[in-house]
Amino acid sequence: MIRILKEAQDISGYLPEEVQDYIAGRIGVPVSEVNGVVTFYSLFNTDPVGRYGINVCMGTACYVQGARGIMEDFRRELALEDGDTSADGVFTVKSTRCLGACGLAPVITVNGEVHGNLGRKDVSKILRSYRKLHGAGEKRDDQRVERPGADQEQATAGN
Amino acid sequence: MIRGLKDLEQIRNRLRPEIDARRRPGGDFSRHQVMICSGTGCTSSGGMPLKDELDRRLAERGILDDVKVVKTGCFGFCKLGPILVVHPGAVFYHNVSVTDIPDIVSDHFVNKKVVDRLLYEDPGTGVKERNIHRIHFFSTQVRLALRHCGLINPEDIYEYIAAGGYFTLEDCLHRRNPGQIIGDIKKSGLRGRGGGGFPVGLKWEAARAAPGAVKYVVCNADEGDPGAFMDRSILEGDPHSVLEAMTIAGYAVGAGEGYIYVRAEYPIALDRLERAIKQSGDLGLLGGNILGSGFGFEIDIRIGAGAFVCGEETALLKSAMGMRGEPRPRPPYPAQCGLWGKPTLLNNVETFANIPVILSRGPDWYASLGTENSKGTKVFSLAGKIVNTGLIEVPMGTTLRRIIFDIGGGIPNGKKFKAVQTGGPSGGCLPGKYLDTPVDYESLKTAGSIMGSGGLIVMDEDDCMVDIAKFYLQFSQDESCGKCTPCRVGTRRMLEILERITGGGGEMKDLMELEELSREIMDASLCGLGQTAPNPVLSTLLHFRDEYEAHIVNKECPAGVCRGLLEYAVDEDKCISCGLCVRACVADAISGEKKGRPYFIDRQKCLKCGACEAKCPKGAICAH
């Protein structure tokens, strides 16, 4: 069932009651059971999500390197709470479990693309560059955006 | 289609020179080989476009056929990613960007000269090391579970076979009976690498002895501990070793089907596993009548959808069946009653990755590594405040000091070591006095922590241990499935107390209450999550009680982390009255005049969010 729900969410972005109801009917289980699974796992959303899903890693390695401040800045800049979508529907910000890229802590992903070695000053830069992409309406999955951590990565080379 | 030993040997002999040239410096393989790390770490730090650029530049020079470019799994030195290793010579290039590729092509491949500026400089000696095997970080390791990570292309089953893969399976199916295999695993002393440390051989024996015609083998790849990424690296770098081991396990316990339960947060690992299963199936190394033995085995993937509790075995099995991942009381254990009520053998990724090595090199050799009760090697992920973040594999019994200060390179920025956290949310924080403890299952337990899956998070003087305890408890409380009350409500109550302490409202009796609640939650919870959730609090109370007392009695956070106890102020000497902080403040707490006198923060209004501190270009705002 989890795989079906995941594929359904990949299509519609989230799993509203109608979708849950449809899936329950097709695989022949009560809708309560489907809803039980949907609400149990953090992968599934029951509300619409923004164009860009920002996941802020809250694993320990990121936490001790300042992930909390980064999360707070996203919340403040976009005026939302953890898990919410910005009023213009462009960004959804969620804290996530460890992404396993601890070597780049603190790390966030935006629609799966990883940004590492972040500082609090990078938050508004990242939002600006994705806003620009959104405005241009040209976002392709393989397109790369400004990488604020890159300078720092270079600077630490050889240390 | 591979029908038997002859076919395997044919493949190995054909590709062997290439693999040997990667293993031995100065191998006789004449072509250059470039190994590009394509694990999550290096991919995230910009490693993906390197291969395309390399191919393009090589084609431009007309030497595409002289150089073989191979995507490999993780080398482990994630801090220095993206990493390239060039054979022959095993030359290690780090922090490689697309703009470095032209130099590598022209200097290394055309002019046969090493690109000096991309070499690793040992911070201790200042010497630049060319050869990866001479770099201290690598030369101090013993890589068994990670044996193929960085050596072969994980997306190519032929490379795995050329490196010796699937020969152990062939040997087991044709020349050993299940009893012998299980006997060898028992003799090796291998214990479950997922955290519990249960003897693997006994688990296999129990699954074999359980009555029933239908049995299952399940691989736990739901690596949930924050800061742990060893299983991910094995799946990304050597997925076939897990498939081979699961098939051997199926043969040993009498199972015909296997499932790998893997986190959805690991897209690269998932992709490589799917390819590996497809390739093995195509070549007849999975499916019916494997290698002409008459034994059949199938493997399928189940995706974990983001619930930490699913690392617990009974919860994992429920989730693998598509249900809510809630644990159930044991016994019956999965070996008697697991997936769909059938006997099920459950081991984690690292455990499986060790199986082919043990069976090919012999249990006695394996048991010669490690300590009396913890045999073999262990993979650790180094993260947090440590210079060499990454993945290492060392024999059990290596001391924490050697891991953190020698291999890990110590604490960055000249800061002082405060603690190392092992075992994730189920483990504890150990202070400096345990640095010389040899690490094994028992010694960590005695010290008040656990081995867990092998995540080591290092903390320095800037980390507040009360805040860390709160962080872990918050995690456990979020991830509690809610089925049993002690865990669901107990962790919430503990969290409230910790929030009170870090907010400045704590009293000394709170500490007693924390200890009492911890004991009750540990006694009364249903599964491992609840039974171990208080560990981070208990271990910090044991080793860092003075920090708790400073929060409660003096109302101060010695590390300067807990916002509720801090006061923000502007350093008048540094302030250039630019006004950026005023714009950042949502509470309207900062006053001043642009280009006038230094700014001032009203402590009554200040929410202590730290936004002004982050915005200040001169570092004039800080918390005390």
Image (spheres, rainbow, N blue to C red):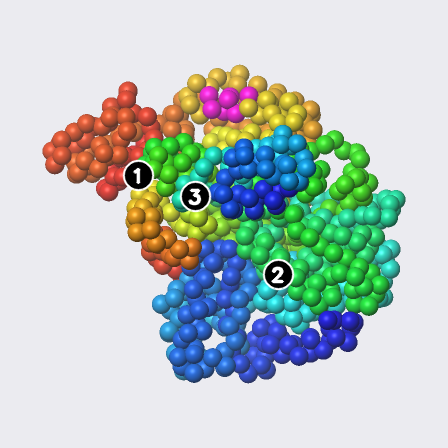
Principal secondary structure, stretch drawn in magenta = helix
Q: Which range of residues does the magenta coloring cover? A: B493-500
Same chain letter for marks 1 and 3:
no
Task: Determine the CA span between mark 2 and mark 1.
Answer: 45 Å
Kindly state the secondary structure of the residue where label 2 is placed: helix
Task: Determine the CA span between mark 2 and mark 3.
Answer: 27 Å
Q: Is residue B365 above or below residue A98?
A: below
Which labelled disc corresponds to residue B328? none
Coordinates of residue B58 in the picture (x, y in percent):
43, 77
Please state the chain letter of the residue tagged with numbered disc 1 in the rendered image: B
Residue at left 40%, top 36%?
Answer: A85
Q: Name the residue under label 1.
A: B614
Q: Mark 3 points at which residue?
A: A53
Compared across the picture, whether B342 is left or right of B427 comes to right
Which quadrant holds residue B560? top left
Circle 2/circle 1 CB separation < 8 Å: no
Coordinates of residue B38 in the picture (x, y in percent):
51, 61
The answer to whether any part of residue B440 appears in the image is: no
Q: Which amino acid does label 3 sit on?
A: Gly
Q: Residues within 10 Å of mark 2 (few under 14, many from 20)?
A: some
Q: What residue type is labelled 1?
A: Ala
Which labelled disc corresponds to residue B275? 2
Q: Say how many tags the image has.
A: 3
Foreground mark, 2 or 1, reads 2
